Amino acid sequence: MRQIFLDTETTGLHAEGGDRVIEIGCVEMFNRKLTGNNLHFYLNPGRDSHEDALRIHGITTEFLRDKPKFEAVVDELLAYVQDAEVIIHNATFDLGFLNKEMELLGRPKFKDYVSGVIDTLVMAKEMFPGKRNNLNALCDRLGVDNSGRTLHGALLDAELLADVYINLTRGQDALLMDAGSHDDTGVVVELVDLAGFALPVLSANAQELAAHEDVVNQIDKSSGGKTLWRKTA
């Protein structure tokens, strides 16, 4: 499976208010291995960044003055992500900006060019409810080295996100492997689909049922006959 980790930097927070994309970073992974076939653009947005945004990414208007407009790189970007699964942290934000750039060029939405989008922020909130789940927090929690991230940068953040995603999903591929693939020793690994196996159902024997009934009786006595399963039964 081909997956692309994508991140953007922008002039501010509001795509519909005139803020624009100034940097796009993409990192390619194929069959859970980083390929090094990455894509990176700095873009001239035609406007200044808000002060708060500038403090986050440090990309100045002067630096971007000679960079291409989004319209000059859009075809290369779309060819790169074509039919891949795109993985973004807080996808609503980045997709909102990319969709606005596409709209300004009269193009379909960005998502129409890819096979799907995974939001790692949604994944992290499900795995770590009630905790901070920004990229720095996930790097710290999952042991990903982010010591070089003094400022936000789209390519660096996409690279960090790739490491975070691999750690978030570690072990999910263990039960189903691609037919004809090779492990590190060169051995061919055949497809094993566990859905085809009928797992045996082991019923409790008389002794186990009696022991269970004894425990239930003790709980029922301690609760003054208020055990819900007895009432339901």
Image: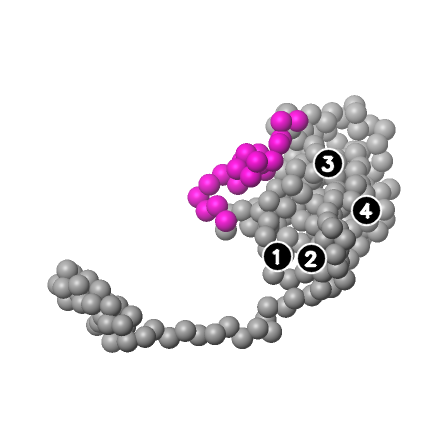
140 is within the stretch colored magenta: yes
Horizontally, is 188 left or right of 13 in the view?
A: right
Give the residues drawn in magenta, as a range: 127-148
Kindly tell me whether residue 90 is visible in this rendering: no
Looking at the image, is 31 positioned above or below residue 50?
Answer: below
Kindly tell me whether residue 146 is visible in this rendering: yes
Q: What element carries label 4?
A: helix
Which three-letter amino acid code belongs to the residue tagged 1?
A: Ala
| Residue at the spot of label 3 | 155
| Residue at the spot of label 4 | 77
Which three-letter amino acid code belongs to the residue tagged 4?
A: Leu
Mark nearer the N terminus (1 vs 4):
4
Mark nearer the N terminus (4 vs 2):
4
Mark nearer the N terminus (2 vs 3):
2
Horizontal and vertical percent for residue 18? 70, 39
* Quadrant of the image occupied by residue 65: top right
Count residues near mark 2 (Cα–Cα under 10 Å), then give few for <14, some for 14-19, many for 20+.
Answer: few
Tag of residue 174: 1
